[in-house]
Amino acid sequence: MPEYQERGVVWEDLEIGDLISTIHWFVTPDDIKKAAESFQDDYPLYFDRDFAKETEWGEIVAPFYFLDASFRWVVFLSRGKMRHKNHTINAHGILESFLPIRPGDKLVGKMWVDDKYVKRDRKFLTWRIEVRNEEGEMVARKYWRSYWTDREATFPEKESYM
Amino acid sequence: MEKRKETKYGTKIADEEKPVLKLSYDDINIGDELEPFTKYMTMDMAIEHGRIYSDFYSGHVDKESARKQFGVARTAMQGALVQGGFTPFMVRWLRSAKPWICGGKADIKFIMAVNSGMTLRYCGKVIEKKEEDGKKYVISDVWAENERGEKVAVGTTTACFE
């Protein structure tokens, strides 16, 4: 098992500029529908082809928060063979959408450590997630700042069938 | 009474020749209030949301973990889920997803835990209009408050008009 899976990554292990991992994503209509469902968003533009056809888009497009559904920071950590050791608490999120995401798009998401600092004895860390399309254009970006506590998270034990 | 298009059987139907109503940059004025949007937060929503990134153990979905993570045995909604509520809020106000998906921005600080059972009311007010690099932006102060009127998330949204 990789080191950071076993012992869990802590705030001190991470350096500004560290690239955590890369996620490749081929967008399907089902991905877009699931994203909307996971945010309890009933706007049919995200899942109803007939409705979408009548709109200015002419087809299904992904919601503004699609990055939050498919490119979550914990998933990037997992892809980077890491897990966080301690509980974190959300503090600040900046989400930007630059271009529409449509079914069939091939996206590449990367996550870096953008910033880390201590304020009033609390440790903060900001992730930067960028999602680009096949042309290399940025379609969405997110800055996600959390307060990293000293309280250890309990992860479920992996079952062994061996 | 407004004249309506009708079929040969006298059924009144929508006039597809008419343009679809949506807010334009010029329709919006500084000081305008955004139409409030109400969202009921439930435990099922947090569980459903956690599924997209395989979370079935954190303080967002498990009470015992919540006690360790937040200091109270009450699950707290994911910050991204709270932030996600600003999307239907913006899209309903704009009557279009385009200014939100093509250049939109949500800059949100999480200032209080949101628990299941809360009723969130998303509110906002236009504070600035500006033109930059051939694009027009409308910036609003926004917040989400619980049923007691306590603000749980505050920040700004930016809608972008071509």
Image (spheres, coloured by chain):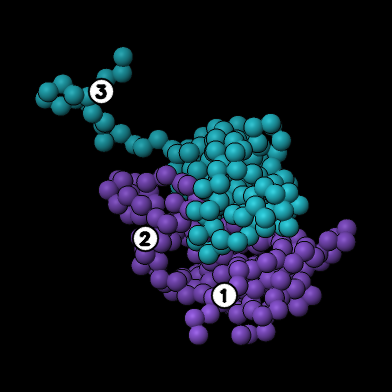
Indicate the position of residue B67 as horizontal and vertical percent values.
Answer: 72, 53
Mark 3 neighbour class, 10 Å CA radius: few under 14, some 14 to 19, many 20 or more: few
- Asked if the residue under mark 2 is in contact with the one under mark 3, i.e. CB atoms within 8 Å, the reply is no
Return the residue at label 2.
Answer: A30
**What's the CA distance linking mark 3 and mark 1?**
64 Å
Element marked by disc 1: loop
Please check whether the numbered discs 2 and 1 fall on a single chain.
Answer: yes
Mark 2 or mark 1, whichever is nearer to me? 1
The N terminus of chain B sits in image quarter: top left
Q: Position of residue B20 (x, y in %)?
A: 36, 37
- Identify the secondary structure beneath mark 2: helix
Chain on which label 2 sits = A
Q: CA distance from mark 3 to mark 2?
A: 38 Å
The three-letter amino acid code for the residue at tag 1 is Lys
Specify the chain shown as purple. A
**Label 3 element class:** loop
Residue denoted by label 3? B4
Q: CA distance from mark 2 to mark 1?
A: 29 Å
Q: Is residue A39 left or right of residue A12?
A: left
Residue B123 in the image: state x and y as whole percent.
Answer: 61, 36
What amino acid type is highlighted by mark number 3? Arg
Q: Specify whether residue B146 is in view.
A: yes
| Chain bearing mark 3 | B
The foreground one among B85 and A158 is A158
* Picture colour for chain B: cyan
Q: Which mark is residue A158?
A: 1
Picture quarter containing residue A111?
Answer: bottom right
Label located before the other in sequence (2 or 1): 2
Q: How many marks?
A: 3
Alpha-carbon neighbours of circle 2 within 10 Å: few (<14), some, or many (≥20)?
few
- Compared to residue B52, the image places residue B6 above or below, namely above
